[in-house]
Amino acid sequence: QAVIRGLQQLLAKLEATRGLLDADRDASLAAVREVFEKQEQLRDQTKQAAAAKSDPEKLVAQQNDVAQDLRKLAEALADNADVRELVEQARAAATEARTDLFESKLPEAMADQDKVLASLAEVAERLAADSSPTENNRSAEEMKALVRDLEAAKNEMAAIQKQQAEASRSAEK
């Protein structure tokens, strides 16, 4: 009975941990999408500036904000090896885009901004794919099955003990 209680507590902890991981993943995915939208708007503004041949001074500050957001995102996702490199690629491209905007190289800046968007799209796709059943989810399900099996075994053992006790009483008579 103690084993079953222990396994049930372990299962509860696994499910709680899975819930926290799901919440972290959802928050990370929302942050990636937010930075993606910010970069996409900035790319559109860069295109307009290139067409109008206007000064991209305001765009430099906005691109710097995107680079800072990517730095924070890199810190938040540092433990996720699956997306770490992609976030770093996006961050490097955002920094390069900022430099290109500062130097008024708008076509190069747009190319770098496209690299940021491509990397962020891949990060979002991988994080979303993580929402499918993972090894942890299967482990929790396996633990549930184990608890059910142990409870069934406990019931069988109780029945066997009862039969053995009756057989012992019958043998004594």
Image (cartoon, helix red, strand yellow):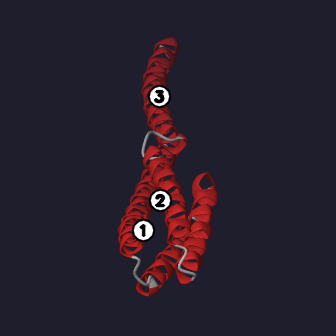
Residue 18 in picture, x, y percent from top left: 45, 52
- Label disc, if present, on residue 39 of the rendered structure: 1
Q: CA distance from mark 2 to mark 1?
A: 7 Å
Residue 41 lies, in percent from the top left, at 35, 68
Identify which amino acid the numbered label 1 is placed on.
Answer: Gln
Tell me the number on the disc at residue 149. Answer: 3
Residue flagged by tag 2: what amino acid is it? Leu
The location of residue 36, given as percent across then percent down, is: 41, 63
Q: Relative to 31, does residue 101 appear above or below in the rendering?
A: below
Viewer-proximal residue among 156 and 121: 121
Determine the residue positioned at 48% across, 77% down.
Answer: 63
For marks 1 and 3, the one nearer the N-term is 1
Determine the CA span between mark 3 and mark 2: 49 Å
The answer to the question of whether label 1 and label 3 lie on touching residues, with beta carbons closer than 8 A, is no
Q: Residue 93 versus residue 164: which sits nearer the camera?
A: 93
Q: Residue at x 50, y 81 (%)?
A: 64
What's under tag 3, amino acid-wise? Asp
Q: Secondary structure at mark 1?
A: helix
Please provide percent x and percent y for residue 133.
Answer: 45, 39
Can residue 39 be seen here? The reply is: yes
Kindly indicate whether the residue at mark 2 contacts the one at mark 3 (C-beta within 8 angstroms).
Answer: no
Task: Describe the element under mark 3 as helix, strand or loop.
Answer: helix
